[in-house]
Amino acid sequence: MGSRGAWARPELLALLAGAWLWVGSAQPAAPGPTAGPGPTRGPGPALQFRLAGYPRKHSEGRIEVFYNDEWGTICDDDFTLANAHVLCRHLGFVAATGWSHSAKYGKGIGRIWLDNLNCGGSEKSVGDCRHRGWGNSDCSHEEDAGVICKDERIPGFKDSNVIETEQSHVEEVRLRAVVAGARRRLPVAEGIVEVRYKDGWAQICDEGWDGKNSRVVCGMLGFPAERKVNRNFYKLFAERQQLNYRLHSVSCAGTEAHLSLCAFDFYRGNASAACAAGMPAVVSCLPGPLFAAAAGAHKKKQRQQQQQQGQQLRIRLKGGAKVGEGRVEVLKSSEWGTICDDRWNLLSASVVCRELGFGSAKEALTGARMGQGTGPIHLSEVQCAGTEQSLWSCPFKNITEEDCKHAEDAAVRCNVPYMGYENLIRLSGGRSRAEGRVEVAVGADGGQPRWGLVCGEGWGTLEAMVACRQLGLGFANHGLQETWYWDASNVTEMVLSGVKCEGHEMALSHCQHHGANLNCKNTGTRFAAGVICSETASDLLLHAPLVQETAYIEDRPLHMLYCAAEENCLSSSARLANWPYGHRRLLRFSSQIHNNGRADFRPKAGRHSWVWHECHRHYHSMDIFTHYDILTPNGTKVAEGHKASFCLEDTECEEDVAKRYECANFGEQGITVGCWDLYRHDIDCQWIDITDVKPGNYILQVVINPNFEVAESDFTNNAMKCNCKYDGHRIWVHSCHIGDALSEEASKRLEQYPGQLNNQIS
């Protein structure tokens, strides 16, 4: 594989989806099965196994098996962790920590050798496991299985292809900054390109190096584009260094997701005289707007860049826990919608990532892996070449909802620059690595950091979301203001207070806080902030069309509203009414609240603190679940919105989803993923008291989970707005939409009534 000609062969390029790990059959003592229909042993070629696909680490990937002189894959049908244990031992690892389905590491080619594989976990060879027979499968490569092995080798294990492995292994790539100021600043956007070699780093000869190669390196490292670099400076630097060249003759098309997918040659044997006519490859990358300030860009220039991007972008990511990942949504005809995952691949995903200011794509995700979107599905069969500046320049098909469902929404994980934020935060005292008391490092710029605690006052879900993101642990499950039960660390000093986050920040230091002026009433360790993180989160949103379809006015007699008054579901003027005579005018509507996330929505409060409501005859698990308000077009409240509290349960679910929560008999409360909770228009408190509202044009606003009491993957879709026209007798509710479903211009148009700002019908 050392020659360029071999690397250029189309069939090999098709196979090379990342650096392969080739190893021999299971363990040295295990004889290899012969090429035949079953797990027989005897003379004959041994089975071989390798990890393929990208993106991956050296201990994980798509599992491929060499049988009957042909490489092939294994189907994920009935796949288990026990299968993965056996396969990882074949690869020389002690055990498996997980496995993947649905071609997570990309689709293989050729035969699917095994299907319905069923190992007990202790077998010495996969040939001893039950399966349908070699080559007998009803799967497609979209079902290729992958394994995640424990990064610990079997003592004495020897690869049969260890030389081959080393020769074709390019996994880690970095930029080594040589300018004094750049060495201390993150992200590193310019420097000498180096690849991991043995226990150190080696350089790449720049003979034939061009902008396409630089583009691939920048994309891998999280940058959307490359820029010109002063080679003369680096040439002077290189002349004074002892260099260890590893690669030469690198030739990329510019669309590759990883340098290992490009054509290149390795230096053989003694490479001391290598690259005589060249120098180390040097790359300078252009950081995206989110990282430009950290990379030293002028703040004014950064703001302009962000404003321009905000005006032009018709694409966004939703539902991801980390920066640079999420469900892909596009803006078309002033309405945001999703992309169907048909033919979705790394090339198209990379165009999205670069357009948003990140690097190339690490993963092109299918099957709504970042949660299901709502509204229209705008595009299908997107087929980018990888060189486009925008997704809208790629060929695609317009589709109808019959062609694709939101269960097929496409998503991406993008390469983002290394910022080192995870080194400035840690958790202590928790039962697992995903929970504990938050400790942060301060003064890290000046050398040795000082670790301290965060004041728990005002600490909530939004702050916890940022902490979990900074830790790389996904979403926040809970933000805790007291952590006396996690008192296991010798760190006792409070170093950060007044933390107030919006929820999208990459690190706690980006949130508002008191800085050096610590202001914390309770500085004891029991009042330090803590978090419980989770890989997944719920995502609630209101079914807007149902509100529009069911809205009407009812004049309800006061003698029927004693219960509602007790629940504070009427405006304050009701207290002055001549009870039980007279009536209140109520705007009634149904609410259907869906959980489109990847985790059940569960109330924060435990059962012991739920409140019994005698009128409704059930327990309420959340004090404030929704806000109902009537606003003027300029945002002023004209009807006192009550803070609706309900019992949470699964009223209905999608097909194949079972109900899990119900209110009856002190049952567990919550909303299951794929289910919805329906509050009918004819139940108590499912209204807004508009008795005191004058005729005019208004906005009906419903906000779910308004105090961020329960963590969600996306809070921007929790508000629903409708336009209302009230003439004193009837009301017209129209144009109901989720708060972030439309473009800014469309939202402004809907919420403004020219000539009607006095709230009077003309």
Image (tube, rainbow, N blue to C red):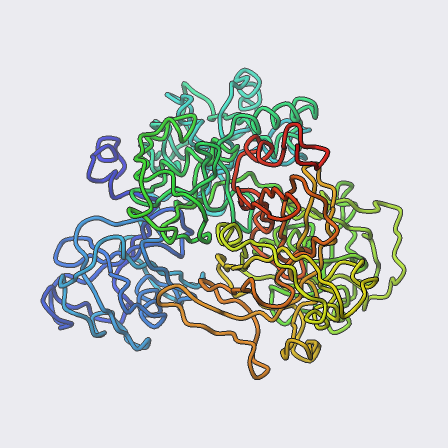
Question: Can the viewer see residue 12?
Answer: yes
Q: Position of residue 265 (x, y in %)?
A: 32, 32
**Which part of the image, by quadrant, shows the N terminus?**
top left
Q: Is residue 167 visible?
A: no
- Residue 497 lies, in percent from the top left, at 82, 53
Q: Position of residue 613 (x, y in %)?
A: 69, 77
- Between residue 716 and residue 456, name the one nearer to us: 716
Task: State the residue lying farthest toward the bottom.
Answer: 665
What is the tally of numbered marks visible in this picture? Answer: 0
- Whether 372 is drawn above or below 576: the answer is above
Q: Residue at x 24, y 40 (%)?
A: 14
Q: Position of residue 554 (x, y in %)?
A: 62, 59
Q: Nearer the viewer, residue 443 or 753?
A: 753
- Residue sitting nearer the eye, 581 or 134: 581
Residue ID at (19%, 67%): 32
Q: Residue furthest front?
A: 581
Residue 208 in which image quadrant: top left
Q: Residue furthest left?
A: 36
User: Where 45 falls versus 176 (above or below)?
Assistant: below
Residue 722: quarter of image: top right
Is residue 443 toward the left or the right of residue 318 in the image? right
Q: Quadrant of the C terminus?
A: top right
- In this picture, is 452 found above or below 269? below
Left or right: where 111 falls relative to 482:
left
